Image (cartoon, grey):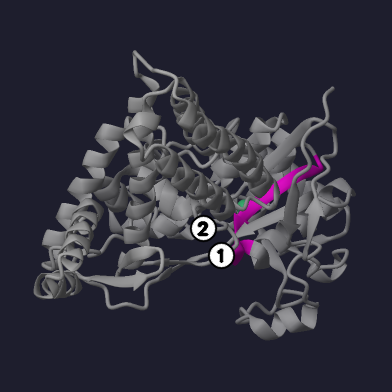
């Protein structure tokens, strides 16, 4: 078997960046905690799905035979509550929202996991696992028909969150249940109240606790030891800590997962929510307004362990990034399709330089992904390359040459394959994508009432201002600067020319 490229991952378990080594060479088993289906998912949940999709795509790309499991939590108090509110059954609610989540995930261009699992389909496996945990002496039954995990019996409880039991205890609101041996013992199985979903078990009619589902599903589809476990950082404690305790108690094998990857939250922008942002908290509303590409770029262009400040500035930044990629793609397509290219010696050296940069960029992009999924670094390398491409293509004469065709083809390959295949953006028809971006900008402008100019408009105004300055028409050049300023754009004159930014 060919050697698989070395990948480094920040493992929450060790708190360090480590080189990935799977249990079985060439095979990778990955589990990602999916959403609880009691309503429409919000944009933060979409980040979780997309981050897992990024991992999945890149692991496959480097040659791993990946088995990827993602679950839906379809038995939960929140679902039961929602069912009561909507005067329907918990089953109906879960079914309904799984369909909605699947639609959001599809619009976001996520690949299908190898297995998508639900609690309802794994009750037998869950009961079997709870029995094994009781047998191992790490769980106990209380007379109400509840099964609890005894955290004091676990090996190193707290090893994922890097806290000891006392510290953890101090940090939580302790539930009053006199029958618990330790206030932090958690539920594996609980008796159902009348009207709630319930299944027969050795401990009476009831339903599983939250944590046990992931342990049982992971072991059924991936075995006792998995390679990569992923989820949001809010799941480190208690959810993932408890998954480890349960799985290791049931299998007597450690570690349950070799690598634990956690993505950061989305914060709401400090800026006052403007009308243009409205109430786009649900993924569906966001996707309806901006589409899957914008969602992918916004949520994956930032390192998965960094916070994303969700606000106008982030959306604007996203539109700018996509605009830059699609403008370059449009130009590259035009150049690559030239029927009659003529050799030109002066152009050779320009494009020769570009060929060297593009080879370097490919390597840089791959190195960035392999370094704990540094997508921001990968995009940074692409933008450096796009600048080099625009410079090389600036001369009309240099555009109409065979080496220009080669250069353009190479750039298209990098956008479609190296970026598109992993981050999943840049694969659309550029004309259509640029139209979409303009439409989104126009809608945003009219919503904010500030009529923010587009990048093309700004560049045209900057060019006009440069002309005016050259002609010593300072009144006009001042006017342009003021106009841009009033429309939310600041410009700065420097040695390399005028640069601009949205305020
Ligand atoms: Zn989970």
Residue 441 lies, with reference to residue 471, above or below; the image says above
**Left or right of 146 on screen, residue 109:** left
- Packing grade of label 1 (10 A; few <14, some 14-19, many >=20) is few
Q: Does the segment drawn in magenta span residue 226?
A: yes
Q: Does the segment drawn in magenta span residue 455?
A: no
Kindly identify which residue carries mark 2. Answer: 302
- Give the residue displayed 77% in from the left and 66% down from the top: 15
Quadrant in the picture for residue 150:
bottom right
Kindly identify which residue carries mark 1. Answer: 306
Residue 251 lies, with reference to residue 458, above or below; the image says above
- Packing grade of label 2 (10 A; few <14, some 14-19, many >=20) is some
Residue 289 lies, with reference to residue 305, above or below; the image says above
Q: Dots 2 and 1: beta carbons under 8 Å?
A: yes
- Give the residue displayed 86% in from the left and 51% down from the top: 135
The answer to whether residue 195 is visible is: no
On residue 157, which mark appears? none
The answer to whether residue 268 is visible is: yes
- The image shows residue 275 at horizontal and vertical percentages of 18, 68
- The image shows residue 210 at horizontal and vertical percentages of 60, 56
Q: Which residues are magenta?
A: 224-235
Q: Is disc 1's CB within 8 Å of ligand 1?
A: no
The image quadrant where one finds the C terminus is: bottom left
- Give the residue displayed 72% in from the left and 61% down from the top: 242
Quadrant in the picture for residue 241:
bottom right
- The image shows residue 277 at horizontal and vertical percentages of 25, 64
Q: What residue occupies the far top of the structure in this picture?
A: 339
In the structure shown, which secondary structural element does the residue marked by tag 1 occupy?
A: loop
Marks 2 and 1 sit apart, C-alpha to C-alpha, by: 7 Å
Residue 236 lies, with reference to residue 25, above or below; the image says below
Quadrant in the picture for residue 58:
top right
**Left or right of 343 on screen, residue 462:** left
């Amino acid at each position: 078997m060919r050697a698989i490229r070395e990948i480094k991952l920040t493992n929450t378990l060790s708190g360090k960046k480590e080189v990935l080594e799977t249990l079985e060479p060439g095979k990778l088993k990955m589990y990602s905690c999916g959403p609880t289906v009691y309503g429409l998912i919000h944009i933060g949940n979409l980040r979780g799905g997309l981050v897992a999709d990024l991992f999945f795509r890149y692991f496959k790309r480097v040659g791993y035979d990946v088995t990827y499991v993602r679950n839906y939590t379809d038995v939960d108090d929140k679902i039961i509550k929602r069912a009561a509110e909507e005067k329907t059954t918990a089953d109906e609610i879960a079914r309904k929202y799984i369909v909605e989540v699947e639609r959001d995930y599809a619009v976001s261009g996520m690949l299908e996991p190898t297995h998508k699992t639900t609690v309802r389909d794994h009750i037998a496996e869950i009961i079997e696992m709870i029995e094994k945990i009781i047998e191992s002496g790490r769980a106990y039954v209380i007379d109400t028909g509840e099964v609890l995990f005894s955290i004091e019996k676990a090996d190193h409880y707290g090893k994922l969150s890097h806290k000891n039991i006392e510290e953890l205890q101090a940090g939580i609101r302790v539930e009053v249940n006199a029958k618990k041996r330790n206030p932090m013992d958690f539920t594996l199985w609980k008796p159902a109240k009348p009207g709630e979903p319930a299944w027969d078990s050795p401990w009476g009619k009831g339903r599983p606790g939250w944590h046990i589902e992931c342990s049982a599903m992971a072991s059924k589809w991936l075995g006792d030891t998995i390679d990569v476990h992923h989820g949001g950082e809010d799941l480190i404690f208690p959810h993932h800590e408890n998954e480890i305790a349960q799985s290791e108690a049931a299998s007597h094998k450690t570690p349950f997962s070799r690598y634990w990857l956690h993505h950061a939250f989305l914060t709401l922008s400090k800026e006052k929510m403007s009308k243009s942002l409205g109430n786009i908290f649900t993924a569906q509303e966001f996707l309806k307004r901006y589409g899957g590409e914008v969602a992918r770029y916004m949520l994956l262009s930032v390192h998965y362990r960094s916070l994303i400040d969700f606000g106008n500035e982030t959306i604007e930044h996203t539109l700018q990034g996509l605009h830059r990629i699609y403008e370059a793609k449009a130009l590259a397509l035009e150049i690559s399709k030239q029927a009659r290219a003529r050799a030109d010696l002066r152009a050779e050296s320009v494009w020769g330089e570009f060929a060297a940069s593009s080879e370097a960029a490919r390597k840089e992009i791959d190195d960035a992904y392999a370094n704990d999924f540094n997508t921001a670094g990968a995009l940074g390398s692409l933008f450096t390359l796009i600048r080099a491409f625009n410079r090389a293509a600036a001369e009309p004469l240099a555009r109409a040459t065979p080496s220009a065709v080669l250069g353009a083809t190479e750039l298209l390959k990098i956008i479609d394959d190296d970026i598109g295949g992993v981050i999943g953006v840049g694969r659309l028809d550029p004309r259509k994508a640029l139209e979409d971006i303009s439409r989104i900008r126009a809608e945003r402008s009219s919503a904010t009432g500030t009529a923010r100019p587009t990048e093309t408009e700004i560049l045209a105004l900057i060019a006009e201002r440069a002309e005016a300055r050259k002609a010593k028409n300072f009144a006009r050049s001042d006017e342009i600067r003021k106009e841009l300023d009033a429309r939310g754009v600041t410009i700065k004159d420097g040695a390399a020319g005028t640069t601009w930014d949205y305020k």
